[in-house]
Image: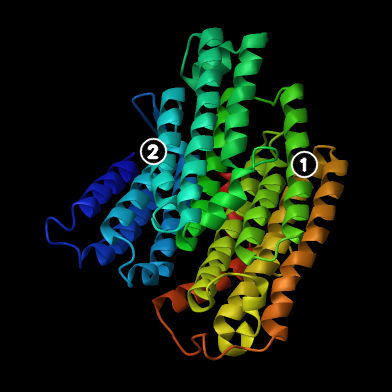
Amino acid sequence: MNAIILISVLGILTMMSEFIGLKKLIYPLILISLVGILGYNICSFWNNPEMHYGMLNHNNYSIAFGSLLITVVFFWFILTRSSYSEGAFNQGDHYALILFSTVGGLILVSFTNMSMLFLGVEILSIPLYILAGSRKKDLRSVESSIKYFMLGSFATGIMLLGMALIYGSTASFDFATIAQKAPADTMFFVGITLLSIAFAFKVSAVPFHFWVPDVYGGAPTFITAFMSTFVKVAAFGAFYLMLDSTFDSIPHYLGNMFVGLSAATILVGNLAASYQNNVKRMLAFSGVAQAGYMLMVFPTLTIEGKSSLFVYLAGYAAANLIAMYIVGEVEKSKGDASIENFAGLAKSNPLQAFAMVVALLSLAGIPPAAGFFGKFFLFTEVINDGKMYLVLIAILGSLISVYYYFKTIISMYGGEADHASTSTNSFSLASVILIILSVLVILIGTLPDMLVQIGMKL
C-alpha cells in the first residue's frame, strides 16, 4: 500500500516536473526514489502482513512480486535513458506514464477484491496504449497503439462479464468470500472461465496472442522492453493470485483448460518464432512460448508451484530486458533488427554480444543461465503432478527454440562487423547495468537457493 502511494506521488511529480522546474532533476530523483521504495518495502513488511480496507493485502506474495516489478522498472529506466537523449519523446510524460503503469502492476499483485483487480488492469494498461503509439509519425507505431487498445478493451469487456457472473453467483466482490461461497453452478464456472480467458489475453497465451507480434513490433523498442518484462510479471502474478485466492485446488475442467492453453502456447509460440527473420518479432513470439511454460504450473496450486513461477519470472524478466535493450541498440545503429544486422556484433561490440548470448541461452533453457533452472523447477512440479506428457511437449518446444535463438548467436559471432554503423567503445551506466543483469542471469541459474527460499515463503 505504501509503495503504491509513494510511486503514485512520484508519478504526479514527474508529470508536473516541467512546470515546477524539476525537468533536469526528475530522472535521478526517480532512480533514488525507486531504490528507497524498494528497500522500505522489503525491510518494513516482509513477514508482517497487513490488510488495507479489505481491498489490498500486503503480504509476502505482494512484497516479492512487487519488489520484482520495482526492480524491473529501475533497470528499465537506466537502460532506456539514451532513448530520450535525442529529444524525440517527451521525457516527463513518458516517465509519468511508466510510473502510473507501475502502480497498476503493484495493485495487481496485492488485490483481494474484484474491483481492485479491474482497477489494477486498467491502470496498468491505459498508459501502455498511449506509449505504444508514441512514435506519432510511424504508421506501425500508431497501428500498434490502436490494435492494443481495441483488443485490450475487448479483453477487459470479457473480464467484466466474468466478474458480473461471479458476483451474480456469490453476491460478493471479495475473493475470500467468493472462495467460501463458490457454488458448483454454471454461472460461477462460466464467470471464472471468462476471467481466465481475459488473463490469457494479458499473458499472451494462444489463441489470444495475435496482438503480440504487431504491438511489440510497432511500438518503440524501449516500450516493448517494458511490456515484455514488467507487464508479463504483473499479469502472471495477478493471474496466479486470482486463482489461489478463489480455489484450494483447481477444478478439473479449469485444469484441463490450462493444460491445453500451455501446450498450444508452447508449440505455436516456438514454431512461429522459428520462422521470423526479425529479432524483435522473434522475441515477441518467444514471449508467447515463455508464457506457455509458465502456465504449466497453473493446474496445481502448491507452494512449490508458486515458488517455481516466481523464480522463472525473475530469470525471464532479466534475460528479456537484456535482449530487448540490445535489439534497440542495433535498431538505432542499423535501422532495423533483422538477423542480418546482428552480423559481426561480437567484433564491433563484444559486451553487447556477450550479454545477448547470456540472455538467449537463458530463454532457451541452457545451463548455466537462469532459464535452465527455471524450466527444471517448473518441469519437476509438473512431473510430480503426473503430467509427464506436458513436460515432453515443453521439451519439444525448448528444442525448437534452440534453433532460432542460435540463428542470432551464429550471426553475431559468425558475420562480419559493419564498423561504419556500429559503436564499438561506448561505455556508460547502461553498460554497467547490462553487466549486472548478465551476472544476475548466471547467478540465478547457478545459485538459485535464495530465490527459491523467497518463493517458498510466498
Position of the N terminus, as image quadrant, is top left
Three-letter amino acid code at disc 2?
Ile
**How many residues crowd around disc 2 within 10 Å: few (fewer than 14), some, or many (20 or more)?**
some
Q: Quadrant of residue 80?
A: bottom left
* Disc 2 target residue: 123
Q: Is residue 388 above or below residue 360?
A: above
Horizontally, residue 344 falls left or right of residue 414, namely left
> Residue placed at 61% from the left, 21% from the top?
192
Residue 204 seen in this snapshot? yes
Relative depth, front residue between 380 and 166: 166
* Disc 1 target residue: 264
Relative depth, front residue between 443 and 219: 219
Q: Quadrant of residue 285?
A: bottom right
> Residue placed at 66% from the left, 74% from the top?
357
Residue 248: x %, y % from top left: 65, 24
Q: CA distance from mark 1 to mark 2?
A: 30 Å
Position of the C terminus, as image quadrant, is top right
Relative depth, front residue between 270 and 53: 270
